[in-house]
Image: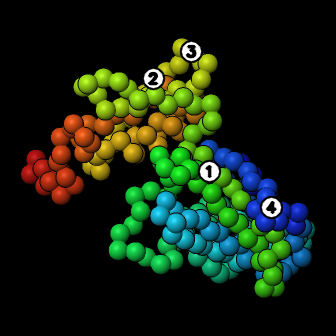
Amino acid sequence: MIFNISKEDKDYKSEVKVLLGEEVLLDVQDLPLNRNVTIHLRRYDDQDQLWYSNATYISDDDGKIQTTKNIVTSGSYTGIDSVGLFWSMELIKKPDTLPEYLWDIEDKNPGKIVLYFDIEVGGEIVASKALEILRMLPEIVKEKVDHEDLVANFYYPKNKTNISPILIVSGSEGGISTPDVVAGILASKGYAAMALAYFEMPGLPHIGRNSFRLHRKSN
């Protein structure tokens, strides 16, 4: 999707929503011509820790910056990269342990990621806009699978039938958090998706990450 930011955007009041995994391309308008412009990107993870990146461009003859075309002259990365602001985000004050995820899965804001963009010209913030990343669409139904032999959650689009099913399991991290995220995204794409845990959950085997690696190495 094209994420437009202009001088009309103030105080993050214009909030756009997009599904996790969709490509976001920035298009900044109403800028002074041929000036240094810095885009600041912030977000807070599920432990309220700040992640940040920035990129400085030179606006074109039309007073625009497009991350697919304009070159980054300095900042968290350089060159042309349409998603550079996202992957180059870094934790400002690193704690002893990193958060498991950059969003709340079950707590304050289930499945919600909010990115805050600030456009700076000549030391002044001229525009601010928020982008909300959704883990799944509002019409997706999540049901806990009620079966003594299964630890699973089932996701599916409401009021849709005859849809293809997909089973998602975790990797070496175990648990159900990662399958839950993937299942929500796939259900938003029109599938019936089951997130299944097979270890590292109550009632399931406890292997441990180190034990799992040793087990794989020995085999």
Residue at the spot 27% in from the left edge and 42% down from the top edge: 201
Please state the horizontal and vertical placement of residue 188, each as a whole percent of the image.
58, 34
Compared to residue 33, the image places residue 134 above or below, namely: above
Dot 4 or dot 1: first in sequence order is 4
Q: Say which amino acid is labelled 1.
A: Ile
Please state the horizontal and vertical placement of residue 101, each as a whole percent of the image.
44, 56
Compared to residue 178, the image places residue 214 above or below, namely: below
Q: Residue 161's mark?
A: 3
Q: Residue 5's mark?
A: 4
| Residue at the far front in the pictured view | 108
Q: Say which amino acid is labelled 2.
A: Pro
Side of 191 where 145 appears, left or right: left
Q: Residue 165's mark?
A: 2
Label 1 – label 3 distance at C-alpha: 27 Å
Compared to residue 200, the image places residue 45 above or below, namely: below
Compared to residue 182, the image places residue 161 above or below, namely: above
Please state the horizontal and vertical placement of residue 49, each as a whole percent of the image.
51, 69
Label 3 – label 4 distance at C-alpha: 39 Å
On the image, numbered disc 1 is attached to which residue? 133
Residue 78 seen in render: no
Helix, strand or loop at label 3? It is: loop
Helix, strand or loop at label 1? It is: strand
Label 1 – label 2 distance at C-alpha: 24 Å
Label 2 – label 4 distance at C-alpha: 38 Å
Q: Say which amino acid is labelled 3.
A: Thr
Dot 3 or dot 4: first in sequence order is 4
Label 4 – label 1 distance at C-alpha: 16 Å
Residue at the spot 73% in from the left edge and 51% down from the top edge: 16
Q: Residue 75's mark?
A: none
Dot 2 or dot 4: first in sequence order is 4
